[in-house]
Image (cartoon, rainbow, N blue to C red):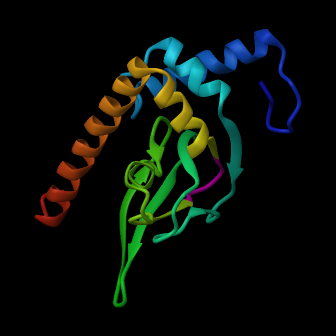
């Protein structure tokens, strides 16, 4: 497994890094995945780092993969012709780009780093291959995303109604 500089980690370092990352992500969006599922996903992933205000992707852009926040926080912002709105702040365990991955359309909002942020990035083609090759993984992955999207829709409904 490459480290952030592209070097190969020792098996022991990779295992400790993987275990810590799994604990953070299992508590978040991909909480239905098994340890084996997570390891399969991790082997296909790359680490990306961002600094304050760096954009991960812009509203309308089709992200080229799935982004999993492993450290730090990101801001989710949406703009239209007349105004801009802060929708959410998401931290470790959060998945970004999942809506675009599911429907192959542009992002519904922009995502920017809110300080130093570390992202685990999985290219769409690699994730698609994993989903098509393992039906159990696919079921758990999609169940995780459905639960998360439902929770986010409920939060958005509350925000719209002014109860948040």
Find residue 30 and report its horizontal and vertical position in percent.
41, 30
Residue at image location 55% in from the left, 33% down from the top: 129
> Residue 4: x percent and y percent?
80, 37
| Residue in view at x 74 percent, y 17 percent | 14
Most foreground residue, 40 or 131 = 131
The quadrant holding residue 13 is: top right
Q: Position of residue 104 (x, y in %)?
A: 43, 57
Does the rendering let one see residue 14? yes
Q: Quadrant of the C terminus?
A: bottom left
- Image vertical order of residue 24 relative to residue 123, above or below: above
Q: Is residue 17 above or below residue 124?
A: above
Q: Is residue 72 visible?
A: no
Magenta region, residue range: 113-117
Q: Using the image, determine if residue 149 lies above or below residue 61.
A: above
- Seen at 55% across and 45% down, the residue is 67
Instruction: Indicate yes or no whether the magenta region holds residue 42.
Output: no
Q: Is 115 one of the magenta-colored residues?
A: yes
Q: Is residue 97 left or right of residue 122?
A: left
């Amino acid at each position: 497994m490459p480290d952030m500089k592209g070097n190969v980690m020792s098996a022991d370092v990779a295992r400790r890094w993987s275990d810590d990352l799994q604990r953070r992500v299992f508590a978040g969006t991909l909480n239905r995945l098994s340890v084996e599922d997570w390891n399969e996903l991790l082997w296909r992933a790359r680490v990306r780092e961002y600094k304050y205000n760096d954009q991960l992707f812009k509203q309308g852009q089709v992200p080229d993969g799935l982004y999993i926040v492993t450290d730090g926080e990101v801001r989710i912002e949406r703009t239209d012709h007349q105004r801009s709105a802060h929708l959410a702040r998401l931290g470790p365990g959060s998945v970004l780009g999942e809506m675009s991955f599911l429907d192959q359309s542009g992002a519904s909002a922009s995502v920017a780093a809110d300080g130093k942020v570390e992202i685990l990035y999985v290219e769409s083609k690699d994730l698609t291959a994993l989903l098509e090759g393992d039906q159990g993984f696919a079921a758990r992955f999609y169940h995780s995303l459905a639960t998360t999207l439902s929770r986010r829709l409920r939060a958005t409904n509350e925000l719209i109604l002014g109860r948040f």
